[in-house]
Image (cartoon, helix red, strand yellow):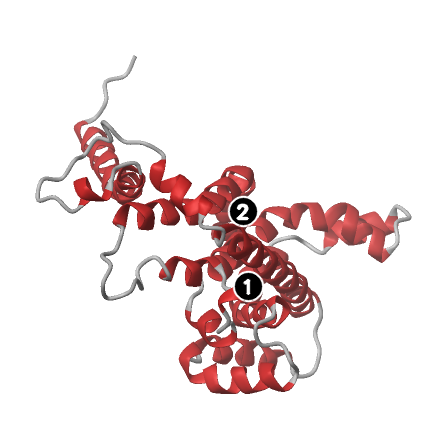
């Protein structure tokens, strides 16, 4: 058994410290969600949830507003992710596989659009959604999210598509497969990790977005989870903020993201590695 080198030991310890620093805010959020507000507002912090309970979670759940906000966020996020992947995949495929007039201009336009500040588009976006009657509507918000994420997703998928040789499709076509059949049987499975990695990025952007939703979804009945979470802090002036319920609500908002990562982590890891060597 070979002896571990001192440099590797130091690097491993540094990695453990960085991981603990990264995980501590998540632990503190869950720990605070299990403690009563009187303990959280005291001058002595409690690092372990001894004597804690699920009272804060029950209070958030019994409020009756979490499930509608969760349903709205799921509809908006999943619609945005599907639309984003569809349009970005088609664009990345066209850029990487075909040579056409205006191809370079299109690539530069995608890069330029990515550089535009989102805040500068709020007025135009609200007017556009208002004219077509999609304010306070999940479809309107999802379309804006998809449009915001598509440029960067095109760049991500472009590297994956370019990394799959076109010779594989041509070989399948020589064996009798059609162009469409060769693509879906040979190329598309190889691009699955890239689609997962791009989908995770789009999911996080749509799930956590706040400012566009605040402009497009002003009604309390059409709130997404980030807007719903804000309601726990914007209490009346005569009532103190219940930080236990705020942390419980934050935990519930983060839980779907954790579940999503657990479902796609295998494909996500391979997709990120593949993108690093194919870009």
Q: Secondary structure at mark 1?
A: helix
Tell me the quadrant of the picture where the N terminus can be found.
top left
Q: Residue furthest left?
A: 43
Query: Foreground residue, 126 or 273?
Result: 126
- In percent of the image, x 49 and y 57: which residue is there? 207
Query: Foreground residue, 170 or 33?
Result: 33
Where is residue 265 shown, x and y percent of the image? 51, 39
Q: Earlier in the sequence, mark 1 or mark 2?
A: 1
Mark 1 crowd level (few <14, some 14–19, many ≥20, 10 Å Cα):
many
Residue 278 in sight here: no
Residue 153: assigned label: 1
Foreground tag (1 vs 2)? 1
Q: Cα distance, mark 1 to mark 2?
A: 13 Å
In the rendered view, would you say 124 is above or below 29? Answer: below
Mark 2 crowd level (few <14, some 14–19, many ≥20, 10 Å Cα):
many
In the rendered view, would you say 137 is above or below 263? Answer: below
- In percent of the image, x 49 and y 48: which residue is there? 272
Residue located beneath label 2 in the image: 271
Quarter of the rendering containing residue 90: bottom right
């Amino acid at each position: 058994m070979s002896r571990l080198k001192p440099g590797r030991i130091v690097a491993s310890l540094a990695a453990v410290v960085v991981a603990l620093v990264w995980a501590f805010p998540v632990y503190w959020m869950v720990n605070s969600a299990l403690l009563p507000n009187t303990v959280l507002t005291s001058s002595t912090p409690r690092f372990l949830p001894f004597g804690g309970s699920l009272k804060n979670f029950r209070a958030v759940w019994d409020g009756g507003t979490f499930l509608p906000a969760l349903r709205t966020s799921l509809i908006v996020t999943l619609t945005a992710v599907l639309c984003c992947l569809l349009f970005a995949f088609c664009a990345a495929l066209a850029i990487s596989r075909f040579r056409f007039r205006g191809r370079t201009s299109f690539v530069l336009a995608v890069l330029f659009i990515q550089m535009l500040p989102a805040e500068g588009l709020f007025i135009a976006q609200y007017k556009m959604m208002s004219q077509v009657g999609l304010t306070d509507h999940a479809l309107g918000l999802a379309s804006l999210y998809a449009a915001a994420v598509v440029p960067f997703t095109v760049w991500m998928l472009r590297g994956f598509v370019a990394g799959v040789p076109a010779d594989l499709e041509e070989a399948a076509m020589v064996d009798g497969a059609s162009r469409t059949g060769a693509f879906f049987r040979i190329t598309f499975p190889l691009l699955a990790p890239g689609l997962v990695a791009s989908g995770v990025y789009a999911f996080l952007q749509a799930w956590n977005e706040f400012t566009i939703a605040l402009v497009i979804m002003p009604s309390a009945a059409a709130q997404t989870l980030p807007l719903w979470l804000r309601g726990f802090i914007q209490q009346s002036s005569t009532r103190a903020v219940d930080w236990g319920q705020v942390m419980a609500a934050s935990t519930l908002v983060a839980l779907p993201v954790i579940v999503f990562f657990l479902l796609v982590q295998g494909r996500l890891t391979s997709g990120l590695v593949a993108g690093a060597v194919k870009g």
